[in-house]
Image (cartoon, coloured by chain):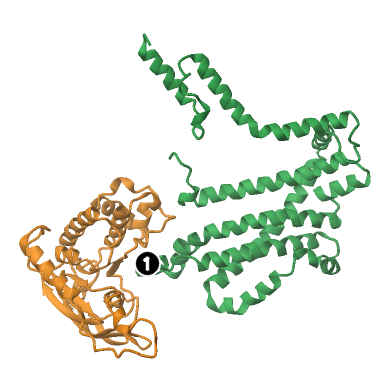
Chain colours: A green, B orange
Amino acid sequence: MSNPSIQELQTGLASASVHPEQPWLLLQEGVTSPWAALVASLQRALQRLLPWVVPVGLIVVWQIASSLGWLSTRVLPAPLDVIRAAWTLAVSGELWVHVKVSAGRALAGLAIGGGLGLLLGLLTGSVRFFETLLDSTIQMVRNIPALALIPLVILWFGIDETAKLFLISVSVFFPIYLNTFHGIRNVDPGLIEMGRTYGLSRWALYREIILPGALSSILVGLRFSLGLMWVILIVAETISAQAGIGYLTMNAREFLQTDIVLVGILLYALLGKLADVFAKGLERYWLRWHPGYQTAGH
Amino acid sequence: MTQSSNTGKTGNPGGVRLEIRGLTKRYGQREVLHNAELTIEPGQFVAIVGRSGCGKSTLLRLVAGLEKASAGSIVVDAKPLDGLSDDTRIMFQDARLLPWKRVIDNVALGLPPAQRSAAADVLGRVGLGDRGTEWPARLSGGQRQRVSLARALVHNPRLLLLDEPLGALDALTRIEMHRLIEGLWQASGFTALLVTHDVQEAVALADRVILIEDGRIALDETIALARPRAHGDAGFAALEKRILDRVLQRPQLEPVPVDTSWPGLPAHGLRWAV
């Protein structure tokens, strides 16, 4: 208390390290020494680590169970074996070949199905005639699960690439179509009327008002489609394939290489996550005007 | 020849002359506007007041060219109005800014690229010169209406239609907006048509206050007060009271026979809940 300025400084330091959402983590009374500040930052670090305790613990238990022979490698390979398998595949270059083939299939299917969904959604959303002509048909077809088509698709296209592309395209079409259609229909009519009174041409009206207004809904459709895209890809690749992650895992299954099967599963998870991060990035960029996507602070 | 160049948009930045002749608008069986007659001189500021649903907004939408009249005509500068006009701009009740465009791009909406610099000028004139790069979601209600005003004025309209643009603002912001609109109107000389339910606003801004009642023009009052007008002024208060009393006067309705077969409230019991 003899030197209030130093005390103020310390209190200031300590309160700066308070967790912004959980200020109660710090006891205000003890904060007079650097020691307390250290304890506080340790507490903070622990808070950060807490969510990781369970997953890391599980992996450790899994590794121990495998090493001690409690868990057969036929059921689950040890985590270290999975990492080793992934490393070997990566070094040999085999991994990238399969990832490239799978990602190529998924993206080609998305481009075809999603592109058609977007175009038709824009068409039926904007022109009453095309809604009457096409929408009820599309709604009927929508109820057929894409996977139920597999036998027919194999008859039509064989077990080639075309079959896989077709399945992915069909399944990503509907989420994008539906959300584009509804996005366009839900554009504030007041804004469209305003645009007309401000002399915008039809095309300018579309570009400046209707498309941006429908964009958040279209992006929701895209995220749905990306989720579906990977699911259908996995099924399509297990039908039969000469390359791709599905081929890698099915092949490994034949030889009881559970470590490679697990690598394949984790790859699918990773690719799915990447696609979602990408879609979220698009949302954050394109919808940066939206208060819901603005990060607090600037 | 000089006549045509005078009425051209860039040739004459002043206001239009507006003649409304026997204007009637029906939606199905319901007549919203009945045989309205009104002449507005170039550069005049006219306020239309009335209760909600009296037909005042319909009149504005007809003048804007957003709707077609059932009968009668609107003549702008001796030419019959046909649809939307480049000389006319509307300021809507809800500012109707595009949330995905920055403030400056909202103001520049519909401007040719060569005139985009004008947007920044006008934004400065409404006092928001430094907010051009903001998203509309970050602005207050009053600021949004100022952007909306700038967006209308950047086209140098010769007829500005204001559809209750200040209805959702607080009293202080509204008085500020009155001064702003009055100043810009005096500087540009456009003809202004303001629809409002606020009699005080009408008296503060307009040269003429028109009351519409049940689709008919019921009152046409010239406001000869000097500008700028002080709200506390005795002449102001007297005029405001007179018009307000007239607005609040029970419209002369034909007696409605009470339907005895209906056991609920009698029809005349509901009359006051308009």
**Residue B264: percent from left, percent from top:** 38, 82
Is A103 displayed left or right of B239 in the figure?
right
**Residue A90 sits in which quadrant?**
top right
Q: Which residue sits at x=51%, y=19%?
A: A37
Q: Is residue B69 visible?
A: no
Question: What is the three-letter code of the residue carrying label 1?
Answer: Met
**Depth order, front residue of A126/B258:** B258
**Residue B256: percent from left, percent from top:** 28, 89
Q: Quadrant of the C terminus of chain A?
A: top left
Q: Which residue sits at x=77%, y=42%?
A: A266
Chain on which label 1 sits:
A
**Residue A203: percent from left, percent from top:** 46, 67
Query: Which residue corresponds to mark 1?
Result: A194
**Residue B192: percent from left, percent from top:** 21, 68
**Depth order, front residue of A206/A38:** A38
Is B248 displayed left or right of A43 in the figure?
left
Above or below, A59 relative to B30: above
**Residue A119 sits in which quadrant?**
bottom right
Above or below, B103 relative to B252: above
Q: Secondary structure at mark 1?
A: helix
Above or below, B243 relative to A165: below
Are there few (<14), some (14-19), or many (20+) residues within 10 Å of tag 1?
many
Above or below, B115 relative to A134: above
**Depth order, front residue of B84/A19:** A19
Is B114 displayed left or right of A272 in the figure?
left
Q: Is residue A241 visible?
A: yes
Q: Quadrant of the N terminus of chain A?
A: top left
- Residue reaching furthest to the top: A2
Q: How many marks?
A: 1
